[in-house]
Image (tube, rainbow, N blue to C red):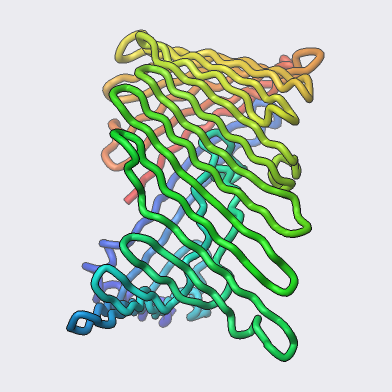
Amino acid sequence: MKKISAVLLILALVGGALFASFTGSAGVSFGFDLDSKDYGFKNPTALEADVTFLERLVDNAGEGDIYAEIKAELALAFVIDEDFDWDDSETFLDLTAKITSAKIIGDNWFVGILSAAGAPNFAASAIDFNADDEALDLAFGETVGAGITVGFADYTFGLAIPYDANNIENKEYNVFLSALTPEYEFADGLTGKFGVAGLLADDYMGGFASLEVGFAQDDLTVSLASDLSFAKDEDFGVEVAVAAGYDFIDADLYYALKDYDGVYGGAGHILSVQLGAEIEGFDITVGGLNLVNKQDLYASVDYDINEQFSVGVNGGYVIADKVWSAGGNVKYTHDIFTATASVGLEGADELDEVIVKVGASSDKLVGGATLALDYVSGNLAADPAVAGTIVAKATIEF
């Protein structure tokens, strides 16, 4: 108890800093499962405080035509999160001290002595996402070991020769090089930049190349980004991302070639395409994911009837698994609340799943709180008598 009181006293003394970086939420919900008859309250909470007692930024630069510059950060902070342990000082004392930049600078050039610039990485999918909602991005190369970064006339070069990976007597060597151009303007509306990198080691030899080209004029925009990977005794790899838009139509395409574990089950070819259009209140999207291996096709149409009402329908079919899906939704937006309802269907040879959702929420009824009431049915296709779950929730955030 004394330990808690001491900490609370410290928080009170630095109250101004505390509330500037103190975030959290508390909620209460009451649910009743109409099938299992389980019911009761839940009290979800999230708390995080980052109270900085001491913070200092260092930005020191010399003088003259050629000078040295160094930047550093030092921070001693008191951090509370959901893993907080009063008996373990390491869970709430956070000391950060690091040098963020160290350069020798001249007229239109610099030498950075902290690390070597890594291989370029321009291409990433705008369509494919993993379980953590992160875009699919096959990074082919990274900085290897310690080195320097050199900048000259907006060009950037990296050189890494790690001390612990190079030995003349043992004939061990590990040298990494990279180069990145600034963005060129080839013509009116046409731009591009390029990058290359290579690693030469006693047990590996490979290279990387990237390009990014864009064109914008009037209502037309087009961009293409690509990363290439090639290495001795390894498969060639490529990643291409294309995005285009004209007036009310837009399109995205993503292609990757390489056997990466964890990406669509280690598939060698990945091809995904999506088209979208907005036509007089209709928002239309059609596309296909992993078209080479799985053929996961989907389409959706949403329509704003007026400022309050919007409706939508969606459907999909996975050719490889022979699984289809369909659904519909409606949304009503009022000045003080929002109500939604949707139904989702899924099946293969027959209807396997039917889920109905109905909900309403408002952050206007009670100042500083969000109130919500939601109903989610069970699988009505498996058991038409299943009742589902009702959840009432109140959430307070600060």
Q: Where residue 147 sits: x, y (%)?
A: 50, 77
Q: Residue furthest left?
A: 64
Q: How many marks?
A: 0
Q: Where residue 64 sits: x, y (%)?
A: 18, 83
Instruction: Look at the picture and state if 299 lies above or below 261.
Output: above
Q: Residue furthest bottom?
A: 169
Q: Is residue 53 visible?
A: no
Q: Viewer-proximal residue, 277 or 397?
A: 277
Instruction: Look at the picture and state if 131 lies above or below 246.
Output: below
Residue occupying the point 69% across, 18% down: 317
Residue 219 placement: quadrant: top left
Q: Is residue 35 visible?
A: yes
Residue occupying the point 58% across, 43% down: 136
Q: Where residue 205 sits: x, y (%)?
A: 69, 65
Residue occupying the point 70% across, 57% down: 231
Residue occupying the point 21% across, 84% down: 62
In the picture, measured across the screen, residue 262 lies left or right of residue 299, that is right
Q: Quadrant of the N terminus?
A: bottom left
Residue 134 placement: quadrant: top right
Residue 283 placement: quadrant: top left
Q: Residue furthest right?
A: 349
Q: Where residue 227 sits: x, y (%)?
A: 56, 47
Q: Viewer-proximal residue, 140 or 311?
A: 140
